[in-house]
Amino acid sequence: MSVIVTDGGFGSDDFQGAAVELAPDTDPATLAESAAGAEMVVVDFPSFSDGRGFTLARLLRLRGYGGRLRARGHVIADQYAMARRAGFDEVEISEDLARRQPEDQWLFRADWQAGDYQARLRG
């Protein structure tokens, strides 16, 4: 089982459709065709130190993808705000990670727009 993390905290997976899954080494040139018509795109994170998924999410959003975007795998609570700023709607983590990094650690970072240094500079 897995846990879905959103700005509201931990929840279960309520998605019923078919999702397109992307590996972190997906060629950015193929993103538009990979995500075309998909209700949800899931980007895998094989390691918390592998940030390529954040780039893929940002590129998808910049290229007009408006569907549900999920990060899945080894994303840690400290990376939640970055995931949201990159364009992810939610993060899917294992129950084991949820036990090691409880909901309060994720909720602490749920106000991800407040810490956006670029917004403060533009402000």
Image (cartoon, rainbow, N blue to C red):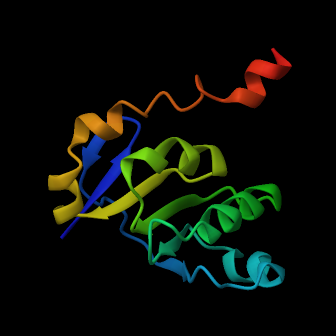
| Residue 100 in which image quadrant | bottom left
Instruction: Please give the name of the residue rendered at 34% of the width and 49% of the height, measured from the top-left corner.
Output: 5
Instruction: Please give the name of the residue rendered at 70% of the width and 64% of the height, measured from the top-left corner.
Output: 55
| Residue 75 in which image quadrant | bottom left
**Considering only vertical position in the picture, is 70 above or below 41?**
above
Horizontal side, residue 103 vs residue 4: left or right: left
**Considering only vertical position in the picture, is 18 above or below 116?**
below
Q: Position of residue 112 (x, y in %)?
A: 53, 32
Residue lying at the far top of the rendered structure: 123
**Considering only vertical position in the picture, is 104 above or below 89?**
above
Q: Nearer the viewer, residue 59 or 97?
A: 97
Instruction: Please give the name of the residue rendered at 73% of the width and 64% of the height, measured from the top-left corner.
Output: 60
Q: Nearer the viewer, residue 42 or 79?
A: 79
Horizontal side, residue 121 vs residue 79: left or right: right
Quarter of the image with the N terminus in it: bottom left
Q: Position of residue 94 (x, y in %)?
A: 24, 66
Q: Position of residue 47 (x, y in %)?
A: 44, 73
Q: Position of residue 111 (x, y in %)?
A: 48, 27
Instruction: Please give the name of the residue rendered at 66% of the width and 30% of the height, measured from the top-left corner.
Output: 116
Quarter of the image with the C terminus in it: top right
Q: Nearer the viewer, residue 37 or 94?
A: 94
Q: How many marks?
A: 0
